[in-house]
Each structure stands twice: as structure tokens, then as C-alpha cells.
Image: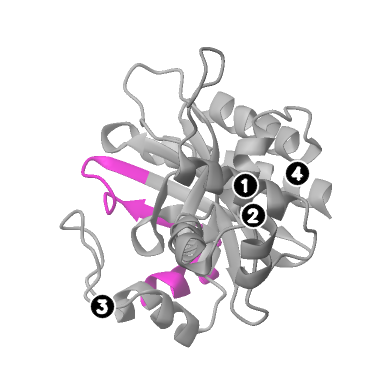
Amino acid sequence: MATATEKPQHRSTMRVLDILETLANASGGLTMAEICREVGAPKGSISPILHTMADTSYVAYDGATKRYSIGLKTYLLGKSFDRESTSMNLFTAAMRDVTAACGETCQLGVLDHGRVLYVAKVDSPQPVRLTSSIGKTLPVHYTAIGKVLVSELEDDEVRAMLPEPLERPTAATVGSVDEFLAQLAEVRREGFAYDREEATEAVQCIGVGIRRHGVIEYGLSVTTPSYRLTDEKCARIKEALARAKRHLERALA
């Protein structure tokens, strides 16, 4: 029985915490059996917890080695206590410059389990602006960041990522993978990706890929209400994104 100074502990919650602490101390990752041994719990109890944590990106699973490791969302939670991170400071500074140049919300995303995971944003100073959350994930086929992140993948890789029928949140969203592949060809030709009211009605987005070691690892985008996206504003956004891309790729090289 718990005393007045000793609060009862929830077993499943404690197992989640035990798993995270165990993985944090294992640089090469651990198998299911190793995790069970370390936390002192049977596979029947640990397996559903691990699967849920992997599905939500709090742990990462390597199918080739059958090992689990700390996932991107757990990493991001840790980074919230590490404001001095050089890379994130670089991105934040570049995103602030983009928002200052065009007056619209700037977002940063990465590819995670075939979806876009939003990892940082700088809000527009305007009263009518995008409302979004860091840590949220969206499909790649109707987001500008998603399009740049998969623009250089092989067609078969993209098809495997997007089982049909595709989710269509608006009438403007592509209805097939073939249509999406045609959009990716446009991204490769132009260097920019567009969400033309495909994710949300009356909202548009322009995105650009950020390379690290020659590979597109990040997507940077600007989102704006459609009524503010004049030709002049579009040109200003693309100029700001291109400038941020050059700066970041030099800094990350």
C-alpha cells in the first residue's frame, strides 16, 4: 500500500518510461528480447507497447536488424530542453528571415514513416494565419513539404508509400498516385513544390527541399491564405525560400 508520501505508480506508464530510458542508454538499439530482459517484463506486456510507440514515432524499428531505438518524436521532446542545438538554431534563424521577408508562416518538416512530420515553425505576425502544431504528421501527397521530400525517390518507392485510394481532404487534392507522380516531375523541373488548396480549402503553400550531403533531408515551406497569395507575394516567398535554402545547405555541408 502506498504511504502518504508514496504515490501509486501506473504499471503501463512506468513500462513506457522504462523502455525509453533503456533505449536511451543503448547506442546500437535493442531487440524485443533484450528490452524485455532489461525492463524485467514479459514479451506479452512489452510487445503492444513497443508497437504503439513505433507506430507513433516515439521509438524507431529497423526491420533489417529487428532492433528498436529512440524515435524522432522522443528526440524532438528532448530537443525542447536543448535550445542551444546548433542545427535547430540555424533552421530557426533562417525561418525567421523567411517570415520577416514575406510576412507568412514558415514550417520545417522531415519524412517519417512515409508521412511529413512537422518539427519547427515560425508564425506569421498577421492576425489571419495558419494554425499548426509541431509534432503533427500529414500525408506527403497533399503537402508542399511532402512533395519536396519525396520528389527524388523512385516511382516504386512513392507507390509503396501511398496505397490507393488516396485521402482527399479537398476537391483539389490529387486522386491517384499517377497524378501525384506528375506533380513530382514538376517539382524536379521547377525546384519548388505547391499545395494549391490541397490540404485545406483557401490555404496555399510553397515548399523547397533542403539538402544535406547531397540528399534532400528537410522540407521548408511558407503557408498563406489564398487571398494573400498575389503574383508579387508568390515571387517574394520563392525568393525568401531560395535564399534560406542556399544559406542552410552551405551551413549544413
Amino acid of disc 2: Val
Horizontal side of residue 72 vs 187, given as left or right:
right
Residue 18 marker: 1
Whichever of labels 3 and 4 marks the residue nearer the N terminus, that label is: 3
Horizontal side of residue 181 vs 203, given as left or right:
right
Closer to the eye: label 3 or 4: 3
Amino acid of disc 1: Asp
Task: Look at the image and give the residue range highlighted in magenta.
Answer: 182-204
Q: Against 131, is 42 above or below? A: below
- Spatial distance from mark 4 to mark 1, Cα to Cα? 41 Å
Whichever of labels 2 and 3 marks the residue nearer the N terminus, that label is: 2
Residue 220 visible somewhere in the drawing: no
Q: Is residue 183 magenta?
A: yes
Residue density around tag 4, few if under 14, some if 14–19, many if 20 or more, within 10 Å: some
Residue 39 marker: 2
Q: Is residue 186 magenta?
A: yes
